[in-house]
Image (cartoon, rainbow, N blue to C red):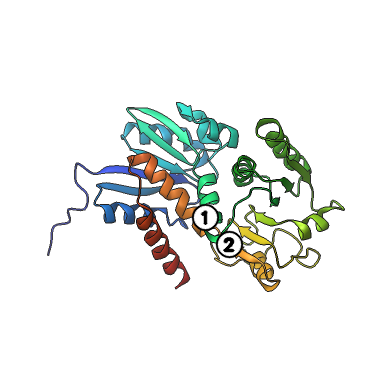
Amino acid sequence: MEINKSITGKTKLIGLIGNPIEHTISPQLHNTISGMLDIKLTYVPFRVNPEDLEYAVKGLKALNFLGFNVTVPYKKDVMKYLDENTREALLMGAVNTVKNIDGTLYGYNTDAEGFSRSFKEEAGTGFRDKTVLLIGAGGAARSIAVKIAFEGAKKLYIANRTLKKAQELASLINENVKYLASSLSYEDKDFFDIFYKSDIIINTTSAGMYPNISESPVDLNTCRFNSNQIVYDVIYNPLKTRFLSEAEKNGCKIINGLGMLLYQGIAAYEIWTGVKLPEDFVRDLCNLFKSEFLA
């Protein structure tokens, strides 16, 4: 028998609010980092109902949490309960990381940084001078679109089932970052040609996510990939969606969303603690989690 000393009165708390949260691997990620670095910091997930969001934020503040993550469906709504949001978070319209500094809550968005870092590492290239097709126009699409525009893409097409949402996101990019975005629906006569000719295709929708693994964001009977394309899916469960499987069959370089999840979490951890994680540590950590998921 041994006394458990993993949590004491000196342990600081971080967490996650969302609904659902049962699928998240964020506790494993952050608690693994803290354990490896011997930092007395424990991460706990909380499922929060929509009507309780404000109370949850105030509760975490009152309990003196060092910070917390925010996941769907609260990344936008949480912003109005924070004291201050970064310019990047305001432009992206979403917060996924909150830091408590002496009772003041600051909102950040690390999703886009996590996406960009994972894409570059796994694709071996960035977005400069590339033509990118973004599928979807929701919260994840907005963060990614802003990041892609800032990183020098030549052209950004935003395709969505509801054209109005695609138009709104394209206008946001053109008016606030750079004039390079165009909008279209899946029924647009140019969609199939743009799909085939784009350098990079990114699915930001939940189509194909477990348990609905037979779904695809587009009609795979009419959309054609070409072997020079890089195809990215923000979904990480399953690791290879039906969309990615079809792209791989056509010779495309495929990337799933696990790296994005890991890197956005690492960026959040660095914001909370002020500790810059060494590159070799980050590499080993990501390899550990990827091998666990691929096992």
Tell me where residue 135 appears, x and y as whole percent: 70, 52
Give the CA distance from mark 2 to mark 1: 9 Å
Residue 234: image quadrant is bottom right
Comes first in the chain, label 2 or label 1? 1
What amino acid is at disc 2?
Ile
Residue 267, label in figure: none
57 relative to 208 in the view: left or right = left
Disc 1, SS: helix
The residue depicted at 67 percent of the width and 67 percent of the height is 252
Disc 2, SS: strand
Tell me where residue 210 appears, x and y as whole percent: 57, 63
The residue depicted at 46 percent of the width and 29 percent of the height is 82
Q: Which residue is mark 2?
A: 255
Tell me where residue 222 appears, x and y as whole percent: 81, 65
| Residue 63 higher or lower than 286, as above or below | above
Q: Nearer the viewer, residue 90 or 181?
A: 181
Residue 118, label in figure: 1
| Mark 2 vs 1: CB contact within 8 A | yes
Q: Nearer the viewer, residue 236 or 115?
A: 115
120 relative to 135 in the view: left or right = left
Q: Quadrant of the C terminus?
A: bottom left
Q: Is any part of residue 167 visible from this angle?
A: yes
Question: How many numbered discs sit on the rendered protein?
Answer: 2
What amino acid is at disc 1?
Ser
Residue 105: image quadrant is top left
| Residue 288 higher or lower than 110, as above or below | below
Q: Quadrant of the N terminus?
A: bottom left
Tell me where residue 134 appears, x and y as whole percent: 69, 50
The residue depicted at 36 percent of the width and 40 percent of the height is 272
| Residue 47 higher or lower than 196, as above or below | above
